[in-house]
Image: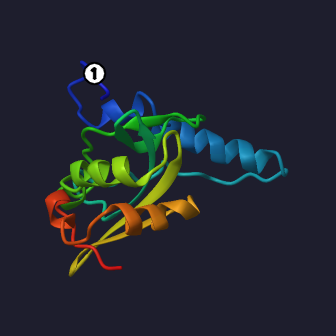
Amino acid sequence: MVVTVDSDPLSSCFNLCDPPASLKQRVETALAQHGLTTEIRQPHLSPPWTRRRAILRAMRVGKGAVLGFNAAKSHRIVDMQENYILRPELIELLPALRGLLSVALQPKRTAEVEMTLVDQGVDLLLKNDARIVGAVLNKVDFTKARLYGLNAFA
């Protein structure tokens, strides 16, 4: 969990992620490498609790799983305990997903978790480790999936 003394809760994620100002500079640098210049406006940041989609990284560690985003310029997964950008319906699924992934993933194996909030609920896609689907199908009793707070379809 990222702890900050800043009064702006959104700034806590920028301690480990790219701050908005560096995004503008990265675009300018990429264009300059090709001899291109243009006016670049500041990136638009989503208002709090409005983002309906996220692609998270997951890894089994010990008897549990970490679930979150990669730190800036790193493969290290920052275990997300709070988020002020994603819709609350997505955040509420994180403990259930950690429980599921702690059973499904092989130790030190990673996966991508794509979450999209749609009218019917959350569309969830687990990918990147071909064995994860087999592990989920073999290890998770779908009649008990509701213990994780998930409705599963094989």
Where does residue 74 sit, x and y in percent of width and height?
A: 59, 34
Tell me where residue 34 appears, x and y as whole percent: 84, 51
Image spot of residue 56 (x, y percent): 43, 52
Q: Is residue 109 above or below residue 17?
A: below
Residue drawn 28% across the image and 21% down it: 4
Residue at image coords 23%, 34%: 9
Question: Which residue in the structure is indicated by mark 1?
Answer: 4
- Amino acid at circle 1: Thr
Depicted 135 relative to depicted 40: above or below: below
Report the side of 44 relative to 92 (left or right): right
Crowding near pointer 1: few (<14 within 10 Å), some, many (20+)?
A: few
| Quadrant location, the C terminus | bottom left
Q: Where the N terminus falls, by quadrant?
A: top left
Residue 123 in percent (x, y) is at 32, 73
**In terms of depth relative to the viewer, which is nearer, 92 or 86?**
92
In this picture the colour scheme is rainbow
Residue pictured at 18% horizontal, 54% vertical: 92
